[in-house]
Structures are given as C-alpha cells and as structure tokens.
Image: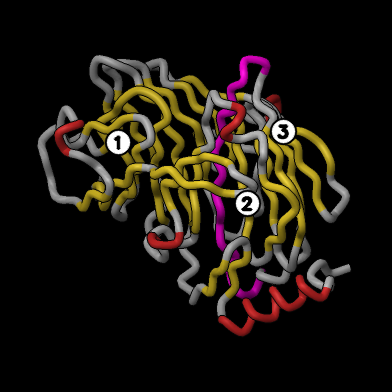
Amino acid sequence: MKSTRKIRKIFKSKPVLEGAGVHLKRAVGFSQVPMFDPFLLFDDFRSDNPEHYLKGFPWHPHRGIETITYVINGDVEHKDSMGNLGNITSGDIQWMTAGSGIIHQEMPQGDPEGRMEGFQLWANLPAAQKMMDPRYRDVKSSQIPYVQLENGTEIKIISGQIGDVRGPVRDIVIEPEYIDVSIPAQADFTHPTKNGHTVFAYVIDGKGCFCKEKKPFNYEVEGINYFDMHRDSLFGNESLILFEDGDHISVITEEEPVRFLLISGKPIGEPIAWHGPIVMNTQEELRLAFEAYRKGTFVKT
C-alpha cells in the first residue's frame, strides 16, 4: 500500500556569516546531524545587497564531501587546485566532489541589478569513497531538462528522474535526487520517493501545504513562530520541510503558487568527524587532514 510521507520536522533558515564576510541563511548545519544523513549543510545565499556577498569565499580546502551549488540569478566565479576556472551563472549547477582533497575559491558576482541568488548543499561521502579522486562537474542551465505537467507544474531536473526524463548529474554514491518544482495556485503535486531515503523540501517562493493534510498534525518545529502561519501545514519562503519515510510526497497550493527545491539521498549511517570544510569518520582522520593542509601535502597528485 502506498504511503504519503508525513512531516517529521520544520526548520526556518537562520542568518549566519561565512567565508570572508558573506551574509547567508543556513537551513541545515552541524546541529542537525545525523537527522539529514547523507546531507550535512544547506545554505541559502540570496541577496540584493552586493556588500553582503562580494567578499566571497577565498581559497579554502575540502575533503570527504561533495558540494552542490545551484545559482538562480547572478554569477559565481570558481577556481580550484585541479585547474578548473570559470563562472557558473543563472540556472547553472556546480557539483564538486572533494574526495581526497581539493582547494578552491568561490566568489559571488551578482547580476547587473546587484542580485545574487543561489543555494549550496553539502553531501557526505561514505568511508570507502572519502579519499576518491576529486572531480568537478559544471552543468549549464541548457543541459538541465525541464518538464511541464498537465496541471501547469514546472520541474527542472538536476539529478533524478521524472517519467522518462533524467537529470544530467548521475553516478553519485548517495543516489541523490535534486529537482526545482514550481506549482501554480490551486493545484497539487505528487512525486514518488525511494523508501529509506532522506527527503526534504526547501521553499523559495510562495506557499504550499506539504502533506495533503490541511488540519494540524504531529511534527516538531524548530525556529518557526506559529502566529506567522495561516495553518500548521502551509509553509512559505525559507522554510525547510523534513519528511518521514514513505514512497511519495504530496504538495497542495491554495491562493498562491509555490516554488521549492526537493532533495533526497540514501543515508550513509557512518560516524561523522567534522570541523569546518573537512568531514571524515574519525577525529584522527580529521587531525591528519588538517596536518596535511598545514604541510602542503593536502592535495594528492
């Protein structure tokens, strides 16, 4: 029998300062591990104030993870120790596997009107792949397929599959799905999910009812003021919805449309030792990684 995923917990993204002084909103971070396994971090770096993002993220290391950057508006200049150099711009994706070690910088540039809109997701790597060779995938917006459903719902497929249409990012260890969904007003959307996988949605515009339940029901809430809400299951911009297990999710809209990112992946279920930009399985591995960085032997050749 098919089961709709219930809401497990709701989060509201919170302001943080990162890099050389970038103002962003963090929806998932260290305090939520291992609730979001295999995901570690989810940041929203939308801003229309260049002073809040232009200082960027100068050269820094990563090991043991993958970073996925999705730009909606603006440009992000990327350079790394593998010799990659270029810009990801509106609609583009950068999927970087740090593996054994990479040093890079990301410098947001914004668009001509000064807007910078994007999101960064960190996905963990299992112990067997922590020290794999680094790789970099620059996926242009023209490579990302687009599907329109009969009710007007529009979906961009970064990773995963809708019907016979597959996204361009494949062969990733955690079997991720990453789609950008826009549902018109007074419509509904049902999407299959793999049992046992972690699934969450992050609302970036409008409001939606996530669960097909319009009456209050049991779930935990973090960082949300009930008095700001119409009803317990209707959530808007900067809300993150973490789902319980099940084989599909359902979303309904009312007077206004909703746009959200739907992300899922296969949990790893391993110990996590995490400090800054490096995520390993033990404190000793973490110590050795930072020692190698200090000695200049961090990047494997």
Give the answer, above or below, for where 59 lies relative to 99: above
For marks 3 and 1, give the CA distance: 32 Å
Residue 226 x %, y %: 16, 38
Q: Please state which amino acid type lies under the numbered disc 1.
A: Ser
Q: Which residue is mark 2?
A: 67
Residue denoted by label 3: 88
Give coordinates of residue 292: x percent, y percent: 77, 76
User: Disc 3 marks which amino acid?
Assistant: Ile
- The residues colored magenta run 112-129
Q: Three-letter amino acid code at disc 2?
A: Thr
Furthest residue toward bottom = 284
Local SS, label 2: strand
77 or 7: nearer the viewer: 77
Q: Which residue is mark 1?
A: 250
Q: Earlier in the sequence, mark 3 or mark 2?
A: 2
Residue 12, located in which quarter of the rendered image? Answer: top left
